[in-house]
């Protein structure tokens, strides 16, 4: 769902790359099915509980009844009264997502997660990128049970559109030219970066397909869009896109701090406050799935002297008890000589933090990649 495809296409200037987009099938619903095998074969709908709640997703059994994301839950109940309705459990989704991502990281250093169930990977530097990505999704499936659909193409735009094609369990590989052909007759709404409003405007101009944008005679699109936007639309319709896969910026450290309303002298009160700050810190660590080895404190005195103290331990931790203990020890050792104005706790040296963007050259040119047959079929769109 998250489309970060907002870079205009400049395919000609872009070096050849092999980009994969992976997207879990019916993600939330699949997680519930994995947790409770008795749901197998039943239509499963994940929606809020309130009267005005909406459907987040549904498994493919439920989709057969016309149920889909963003539909009012009440409507879904009418369409499928015997369906199993479940409320979202984000902790669980995050846990599955993290496990899948951990496996992905063993296959590529250049990964850009877009949401809990979606990521781009740059596999340009891999010798047999298609087999590599296939092995990756198979490993994820074996380890977590999650099924991912895959699109592989020369840029993010191709990869994204391909991964959405003939879901579930899709595995589509195509060049830019093949994408143009494959999706020529599809609605422009298929293309990320062409939103519902643009689709409506295009419709008003009689342009109802991707090829229609590409082949529009000069002046036609200009009736509604400025020159720059026309260029963008045409580039997208040609599946040109210059965006690179941006690996998540590494978190180097996480910290929490507080400034007191009144300066604090009592060491017990300061220690207690450290415990509170650490609890908040650990919650954030947990969300990011991080564990660190260097624990530090920061103290600002009433005369604005700032000091930091840190210590590195042998084992990675995200445990509030361990961190509070060490932080309190550092505080006692420092023994603030004046009233304290600000207190902070920090953790760094995270587990597995060596990810780096590979600036590698393509190992295998596109012409040599084995490209499966992807002839459009009736009813594809
Ligand atoms: P998607 O990948 O768009 O949907 P999906 O994984 O359920 O189904 P598929 O990919 O097979 O088409 O979104 C991932 C999760 O995000 C989805 O399981 C639930 C959540 N989501 C919402 O909460 N609201 C929405 O409108 C959409 C589209 C998704
Ligand atoms: Mg999905």
Image: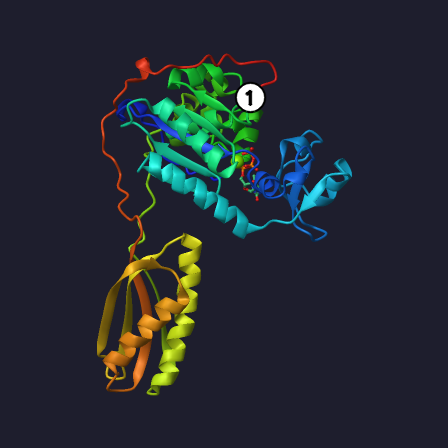
The reply to whether residue 219 is in sight is no
- 90 or 137: which is nearer to us? 137
Left or right of 69, for residue 339: left
Q: Secondary structure at mark 1?
A: loop
Q: Is residue 292 above or below residue 65?
A: below
Q: Nearer the viewer, residue 125 or 233?
A: 125
* Residue that numbered label 1 is attached to: 208
Residue 218 % position (x, y): 42, 18
Quarter of the image holding residue 372? Answer: top left
* Above or below: residue 87 compared with residue 166: below
Q: Which residue does the image show at 57% across and 42% down from the upper left?
A: 31
- In the visual, does 141 lie left or right of 132? right
Q: Name the side, left or right, on which 72 lies relative to 15.
A: right
Which residue in the rendered view is the most extreme toward the front? 314
- Packing grade of label 1 (10 A; few <14, some 14-19, many >=20) is some
Q: Position of residue 335 (x, y in %)?
A: 26, 83
The image position of residue 210, as x and y in percent, is: 49, 21
Looking at the image, residue 307 sits to the left or right of residue 26; the answer is: left
Look at the picture and state if 306 lies above or below 319.
below
Q: Nearer the viewer, residue 27 or 233?
A: 27
Res 254 seen here = yes
As displayed, is residue 60 above or below residue 93?
Answer: above
Residue 51: give x, y in percent of width and height: 72, 52
């Amino acid at each position: 769902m998250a489309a970060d495809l907002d870079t205009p296409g400049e395919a000609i200037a872009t070096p050849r790359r092999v980009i994969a987009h992976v997207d879990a099938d019916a993600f939330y619903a699949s997680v519930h099915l994995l947790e409770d095998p008795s749901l197998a074969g039943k239509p499963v709908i994940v929606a809020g509980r309130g009267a005005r709640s909406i459907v987040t997703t549904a498994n493919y059994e439920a989709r057969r009844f016309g149920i889909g994301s963003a539909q009012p839950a009440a409507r879904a109940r009418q369409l499928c009264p015997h369906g199993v309705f479940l409320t979202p459990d984000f902790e669980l989704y995050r846990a599955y997502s993290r496990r899948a991502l951990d496996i992905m990281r063993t296959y590529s250093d250049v990964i850009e997660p877009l949401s809990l169930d979606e990521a781009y990977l740059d596999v340009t530097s891999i010798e047999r990128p298609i087999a590599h990505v296939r092995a990756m999704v198979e490993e994820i499936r074996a380890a977590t049970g999650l099924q991912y659909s895959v699109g592989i193409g020369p840029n993010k735009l191709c990869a994204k559109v391909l991964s959405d094609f003939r879901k579930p369990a899709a595995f589509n590989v195509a060049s830019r030219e093949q994408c143009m052909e494959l999706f020529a007759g599809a609605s422009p709404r298929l293309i990320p970066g062409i939103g519902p409003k643009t689709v409506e405007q295009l419709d008003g101009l009689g342009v109802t397909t991707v090829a229609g944008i590409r082949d529009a005679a000069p002046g036609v699109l200009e009736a509604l869009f400025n020159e720059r936007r026309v260029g963008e639309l045409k580039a997208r319709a040609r599946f040109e896109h210059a965006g690179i896969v941006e690996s998540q910026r590494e978190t180097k450290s996480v910290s929490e701090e507080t400034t007191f309303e009144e300066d604090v002298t009592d060491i017990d009160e300061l220690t207690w406050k450290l415990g509170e700050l650490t609890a908040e810190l650990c919650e954030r660590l947990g969300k990011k799935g991080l564990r660190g080895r260097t624990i530090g404190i920061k103290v600002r005195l009433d005369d604005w002297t700032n000091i930091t103290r840190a210590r590195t331990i042998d084992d990675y931790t995200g445990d509030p008890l361990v961190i509070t203990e060490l932080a309190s020890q550092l505080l006692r050792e420092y023994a603030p000589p004046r009233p304290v104005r600000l207190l902070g706790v920090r953790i760094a040296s995270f587990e597995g933090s060596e990810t780096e963007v590979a600036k590698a050259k393509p190992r295998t040119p596109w012409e040599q990649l084995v490209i499966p047959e992807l002839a459009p079929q009736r009813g594809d769109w």
